[in-house]
């Protein structure tokens, strides 16, 4: 079976059970500083999981583009990826554990055809505050699983959330495929990382609210949020040993073989997998309509790391010319029929890959000079400090084995233990920083966040009035303190233009205009003059928020009810975000009223 058939089969299964298909959201989250990328299908649905009514109803299904970098060190095995497509279905205060588990079981056994004995599941074992999830356990027993197929684990393994310090959370039940071999040589369970058990699906039951004091209260609205990797279920359906044998990867791997003159073999399979995986992620990030480009911060930094890792591996294979655009062309041809933004933005993708390749070559040259100078200061038999080896990796992109080769030529060893310590410290800081992101955005449904969201709409309108209709939103990020808005524009704004924008926003605030919301199809929204990122699947019901005389946008909320709630709008910074993209940061002072 091909990937497109699996996507269709999954969507059809849930549509037949009352779910409405929703479009895949952008990889770059709007108004949510909790994550750099969309890492799961639930992220665009946060307002609805927290109580907003979704225009498509209480049962939803989709295929969501996702980027995850926390598993980047695992990439190269058979099942972990940086970019992947998540098959997801949701119940917004509709069905709960019994129906969710039954539907997941039916899809896996009756549609995918997995024998019951090849399944294993995990269930929350409970703790001092939350009881054991006997309900999920009984549901699995009722569909036919035996006791030795059901494993109880703690919060580390079988609990989701909250995404911030407080908020919706709950136990989950994870479904695994038993590969049939005890790779670790012992009688292990799904929590073992030896590879015997491959996670297929995760069903999260959001039934608790974590409070500021650390306690948990039952939610009035109980939701189900599920996620399953298209890559994994496709490989399992086709009885393949890993995801790279599917039609999602084989054309990419074959092109790399052709370009390098090397056959993918046991000796180099990890490099082939990393290149094909990272290039998929790179193409989808560059191909997103938000026009992210390589940089030293945020999404651009992750993008740059992925591109440079690919360049290093290609050079390691003995190829000095830039073959990245050719690999990208294969990926675009594979995915553009489903994700048309890739073909729409292909020129941008190729241009950025050319620019980054040229820039990295200069960086490598600089690194070689630094490495040569550092190693020349040592004598044969001496040891290079691990911290210096890590700096060559972190600053100049030198993989450890590259530095080892340079050192070996001079009879110098490397403090591997010191290098690994610096690397571990760096990874831990990165993880901590990512976790620290979960403290705001739409996950924080405060009144101030809603007010800033409405102010963003007014800002978007004001920019188009002052700078012209060609201005388009490129990204948005909101926390409880400020808004950040990225938009297409080629030059720095003048002081007069910034003042004019502020005046328009504050004029709208001073008029005490109600913020109205109407549900309509996307076609109707376009016809009514609404702005927004329009999905390709017309006919989907969307929410259109209107501030009469100023703004009319497709959006999911939350919003203020009246502009008078916003207070004084003030731009605090205007700067470059990327090539052809400007960024405005602004705040609201609700203690001040505005008179015009």
Image: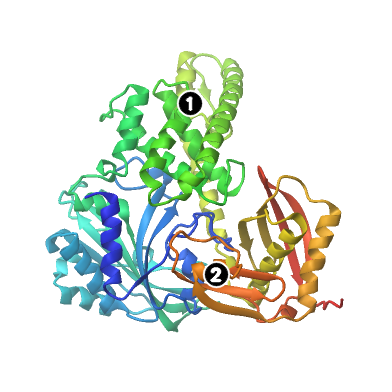
Q: Secondary structure at mark 2?
A: helix
Query: Where is mark 2, residue-wise?
Result: 525
Q: Is residue 298 above or below residue 593?
A: above
Mark 2 vs mark 1, CA separation in Å:
44 Å
Q: Position of residue 73 (x, y in %)?
A: 41, 43
Q: What residue is rendered at 28% in x and 29% in y?
A: 264
Q: What residue is rendered at 48% in x and 49% in y?
A: 341
Q: Is residue 258 left or right of residue 552?
A: left
Q: Is residue 447 above or below residue 491?
A: below
Labels 2 and 1: the sequence-earlier one: 1
Judging depth in this view, the residue of 269 and 542 nearest the camera is: 542
Is the C-beta separation of discs 2 and 1 under 8 Å?
no
Q: Secondary structure at mark 1?
A: loop
The image's mark for residue 322 is: 1
All told, the count of numbered labels is: 2
Q: Is residue 133 visible?
A: no
Q: Position of residue 207 (x, y in %)?
A: 40, 79
Q: What residue is rendered at 59% in x and 33% in y?
A: 395
Closer to us: mark 2 or mark 1?
A: 2
Tell me the quadrant of the picture where the C terminus can be found.
Answer: bottom right
Q: Dot 1: few (<14), some (14–19), or many (≥20) neighbours within 10 Å?
A: some
Q: Position of residue 343 (x, y in %)?
A: 46, 44
Residue sticking out furthest to the front: 527
Judging depth in this view, the residue of 113 and 522 nearest the camera is: 522
Judging depth in this view, the residue of 380 and 363 nearest the camera is: 363
Q: What residue is rendered at 49% in x and 76% in y?
A: 50
Which quadrant of the view contains residue 114?
A: bottom left
Q: Dot 2: few (<14), some (14–19), or many (≥20) neighbours within 10 Å?
A: many
């Amino acid at each position: 079976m091909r990937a497109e058939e699996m996507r269709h089969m999954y969507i059809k299964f849930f549509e037949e059970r009352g779910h409405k298909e929703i479009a895949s959201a952008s990889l770059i989250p709007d108004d949510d500083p909790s994550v750099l990328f969309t890492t799961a299908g639930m992220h665009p649905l946060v307002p609805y999981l927290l109580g907003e009514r979704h225009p498509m109803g209480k049962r939803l299904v989709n295929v969501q583009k996702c980027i995850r970098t926390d598993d980047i060190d695992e990439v190269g095995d058979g099942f972990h990826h940086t970019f992947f497509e998540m098959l997801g279905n949701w119940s917004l205060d509709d069905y709960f554990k019994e129906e969710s588990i039954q539907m997941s079981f039916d899809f896996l056994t009756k549609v995918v055809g997995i024998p019951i004995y090849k399944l294993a599941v995990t269930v929350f074992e409970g703790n001092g505050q939350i009881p054991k999830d006997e309900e999920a356990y009984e549901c699995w027993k009722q569909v036919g699983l035996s006791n030795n197929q059901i494993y109880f684990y703690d919060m580390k393994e079988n609990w989701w959330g909250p995404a911030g310090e407080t908020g919706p959370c709950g136990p989950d039940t994870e479904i695994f495929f038993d590969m049939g071999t005890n790779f670790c040589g012992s009688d292990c369970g799904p929590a073992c990382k030896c590879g015997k058990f491959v996670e297929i699906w995760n069903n999260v039951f959001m039934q608790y609210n974590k409070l500021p004091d650390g306690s948990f209260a039952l939610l009035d609205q109980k939701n189900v949020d599920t996620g399953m990797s298209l890559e994994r279920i496709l490989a399992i359906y086709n009885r393949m040993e890993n995801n790279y044998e599917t039609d999602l990867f084989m054309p990419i791997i074959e092109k790399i073989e052709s370009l390098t003159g090397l056959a993918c073999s046991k000796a180099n399979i990890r490099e082939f997998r990393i290149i094909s995986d990272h290039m998929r992620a790179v193409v989808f990030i560059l191909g997103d309509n938000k026009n992210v480009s390589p940089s030293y911060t945020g999404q651009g930094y992750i993008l740059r790391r992925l591109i440079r890792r690919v360049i290093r591996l290609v050079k390691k294979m003995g190829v000095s010319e830039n073959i990245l655009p050719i690999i990208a062309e294969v990926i675009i041809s594979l995915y553009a029929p489903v994700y048309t933004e890739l073909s729409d933005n292909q020129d941008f993708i190729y241009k950025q890959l050319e620019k980054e390749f040229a820039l990295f070559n200069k960086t490598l040259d600089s690194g070689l000079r630094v490495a040569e100078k550092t190693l020349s200061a040592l004598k044969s038999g001496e040891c290079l400090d691990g911290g210096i080896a890590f700096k060559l990796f972190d600053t100049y992109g030198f993989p450890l084995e590259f530095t080892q080769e340079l050192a070996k030529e001079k009879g110098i060893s490397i403090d591997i233990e010191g290098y690994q310590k610096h690397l571990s410290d760096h990874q831990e800081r990165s993880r901590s920083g990512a976790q620290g992101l979960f403290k705001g955005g739409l996950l924080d449904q405060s009144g101030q966040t809603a007010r800033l969201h409405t102010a963003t709409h007014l800002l978007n309108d004001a920019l188009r009035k002052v700078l012209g209709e060609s201005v388009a939103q490129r990204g948005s990020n909101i926390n409880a303190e400020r808004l950040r808005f990225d938009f297409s524009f080629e030059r720095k704004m003048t002081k007069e233009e910034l003042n004019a924008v502020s005046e328009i926003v504050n004029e709208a605030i001073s008029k005490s205009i109600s913020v109205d919301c109407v549900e309509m199809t996307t076609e109707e929204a376009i016809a009514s003059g609404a702005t927004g990122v329009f999905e390709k699947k017309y006919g989907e019901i969307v929410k259109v928020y209107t501030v009469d005389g100023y703004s009319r946008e497709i959006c999911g909320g939350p919003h203020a009810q009246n502009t008078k709630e916003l207070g004084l709008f003030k731009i605090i910074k205007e700067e470059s975000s990327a090539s052809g993209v400007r960024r405005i940061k602004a705040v609201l002072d609700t203690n001040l009223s505005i008179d015009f």
